[in-house]
Image (cartoon, grey):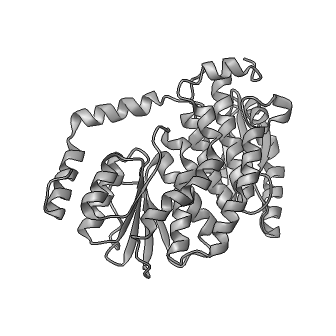
Amino acid sequence: MALDNPEEVLKMDSLGMFKATESFPSQIEGSFSIAEAALSRVRKEKFDSIIGCGMGGSAMGLELAKSWLQVELGAPFVIVRDYRLPAHVGPNDLVILASYSGDTEETLSCMVEAAKRRSPMVSISAGGEIERFSRALGVPHFKLPGGLQPRTALGYLFALPVILFEHLGLADRRRLNELLESVPALRTTAEKCSYRTPEPENPAKRLAAKLVDSLPVVCGYGPFAAAALRFKQQLNENSKMLAKCEAFPELDHNEIEGFNADPDRARAVLVLLQGDVEPQVAARIEETLKVLRGSVDDVVEVKGFGSGVAQLLTAIQVCDSASLFLAFLRGKDPGPVNQISKLKGALTGRTDFTKRLEAEVERLCGRALA
């Protein structure tokens, strides 16, 4: 299939994933106006810890914010991808609930549990039960624009926690400036990775072509480890293929041995997402690649453009777009997630879990939900 045939590419994209992915930079800019109204209701106080709750694409923004800011955040930041909060969470811990649809039952469960423990909360969604529960419980809510797939709303889901942390004094103001300053580079990268840009000038199309019929093993260090997880998830949901992700330096203590597999294994391609790193980490990565080059079919290095967070976000833009082109090369529509939808439908038919959570919220707030 020809990647440089825009009409054919868009014909296979039933949900507008290419155009939504190109909106990444405008989402970051738009997050500041979304945050403005809700932030006035978020009290500035000291918290023992921050707990971020989310699943899948909705949790990825929290993961990226944590990986970028964790060395300077003024409180421990834990991400929960489950129905239950850690036992220590209580009135002195801030709980952030992120669900693009607003109907993710694991996140709703954590919200009800946080309310019972009297934990301060902030919620992020495009509507759904999260918004209803927030209104009933008096929780500040960041309302996202609708009409997107959760995995294409990363700009909002990443920028809003960063803005929140600066408001609370947990992150420095310069981080917001750096985030805004990354937008021009991100916009340029989105144009480079567009379905309209020919393959020779398009890093996303070139990356996709290298991953056809492979088992991608995506690696990164620091914030780029979170970007590696993002790419792995995008390969799963958009490209409809298996992939692995690993993080430096941990992979040097276990995963590196696993590449000595038998000749009948899937064609493994090592994808390294990287930015500027400390000399000792750069040396570790360089030596690891030397060891592994003979054990994989190819090593593909992906670097973003610019520096700081711009380098991280532009690398993500390249990878997000590549996952869409890879879907096209595999003859797949990147938008629908039929297996996930099938599972959700089956679970909805078997339980009344969300209804029970709704009843809990009504009991907590002493009135019926609107």
- 44 relative to 259, above or below: below
On the picture, is 331 further left or further right than 90? right
On the picture, is 111 further left or further right than 28? left
- 226 relative to 139, above or below: above
Q: Which quadrant does the N terminus fall into?
A: top right
Could you say where residue 77 lies in the image, as x and y percent from the top left?
A: 49, 69
Q: Quadrant of residue 163?
A: bottom right
Could you say where residue 336 lies in the image, as x and y percent from the top left?
A: 49, 28
- 268 relative to 66, above or below: above
**Numbered disc total:** 0
Residue 111 or residue 36, whichever sits in front:
36
Farthest residue, direction right: 200
For image coordinates 27% across by 72% down, the residue present is: 118
Residue 34 or residue 167, whichever sits in front:
34
For image coordinates 77% across by 58% down, the residue present is: 275
The answer to whether any part of residue 219 appears in the image is yes
Q: Quadrant of residue 250?
A: bottom right
Residue 250 or residue 197, whichever sits in front:
197
- 175 relative to 225, above or below: below
